[in-house]
Image (cartoon, rainbow, N blue to C red):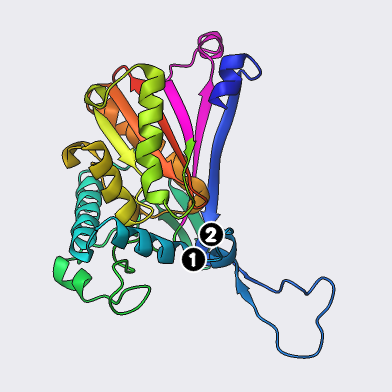
Amino acid sequence: IDQQVRAGDLDVAVAGGMESMSAAPYLLKQARFGYRMGDAKALDAMVHDGLTNPFTGKQMFVEATEVGDELEITRPDMDRFALRSHELAIEATDEGRLSEEIAPVTIESRKGETVVEVDEAPRRESSLEALSKLPGLTGKEGSHTAGNAPGVNDGAGALVLASDEWASRNGRQPLATIVAQAAVADDFPYLARTPANATRAALEKAGLTLEDIDLFEINEAFASVAINSLRMLGLDESKVNVNGGAIALGHPIGASGARILGALVHELRRRGGGLGCAAICSGGGQGDAVILEVNGG
């Protein structure tokens, strides 16, 4: 959409997505045309459509574990990073920093109305000891666990993108300006490399260096993805996912791009402005990054 706006094909558009992973159904792939005699398989739509590499048939956590081992990212590294994500998210929640990012949802029931306005995913009780006791997703010795990867999450996010001319004509004050964006591809098991490579490509487009960027949001699809991104780019952790990331806040697949961009904009505004970079991987080996500028709150 950024490119369409720059080309003049669009004046304004809403970009976003949603995912209700908890409501993902089970699929009967042959039901439309009928089954033959014998047992049939019900497919978990969340796993089949969202968390499986279509090129290899392997689930994402399997490939993330294999690549994490190859890149020498250890289980303790991942657990420590996961705990950091939860602690920062809890701190940001308690201090009210996430309220600007969250649109309250009112749920009506027989007992009355319930307003959901606080993310329930971050875990206050998390600790390195508790994380270390969790079994690996690929077996007892597997490095990825339910504790250092995002859970089953529901969420939605949206952004409004517009040209300067449209914003001025309609009296709208932009929250941020997109400076550059880039998409890259890598061999499909190596999604852990793509956020860093996309970041480098976007920086090159913008004529900027890593030192020019004040804050980073790198989607924590798995702890290994975020850790490897920090290592490849040589980033200071204090500038990355400062209010927690997807391990704590969730990775509802269709909404995560909008969420990390929104988080970046709001935190830069809170700090008085600056340059930020948001980067995310995709399961097939794609990586995307956006550099934006905020002029102040």
Q: Amino acid at mark 1?
A: Gln
Is residue 226 in view? yes
| Quarter of the figure with the C terminus | top left
Residue bounds of the magenta highlight: 154-183
Q: Position of residue 149 (x, y in %)?
A: 34, 61
Q: Is residue 293 left or right of residue 4?
A: left
Q: Position of residue 172 (x, y in %)?
A: 48, 16
Rate crowding at label 1 as few (under 14), some (14 to 19) or many (20 or more) other CA atoms within 10 Å.
Answer: some
- The numbered disc on residue 53 is 2
* First in sequence: mark 1 vs mark 2: 2
Q: Position of residue 103 (x, y in %)?
A: 43, 43
Q: Along the line of sight, which residue is nearer the eye, 95 or 84?
A: 84
Q: Along the line of sight, which residue is nearer the eye, 89 or 49?
A: 49
Q: Amino acid at mark 2?
A: Asn
Q: Are marks 1 and 2 in contact (CB under 8 Å)?
A: yes
- Residue wearing tag 1: 59
Residue at 66%, 80% in the rendered image: 41
Q: Quadrant of residue 142?
A: bottom left
Spatial CA distance of label 1 from label 2 is: 6 Å
Q: Is residue 155 left or right of residue 192?
A: right
Q: Is residue 29 left or right of residue 279?
A: right
Rate crowding at label 2 as few (under 14), some (14 to 19) or many (20 or more) other CA atoms within 10 Å.
Answer: many
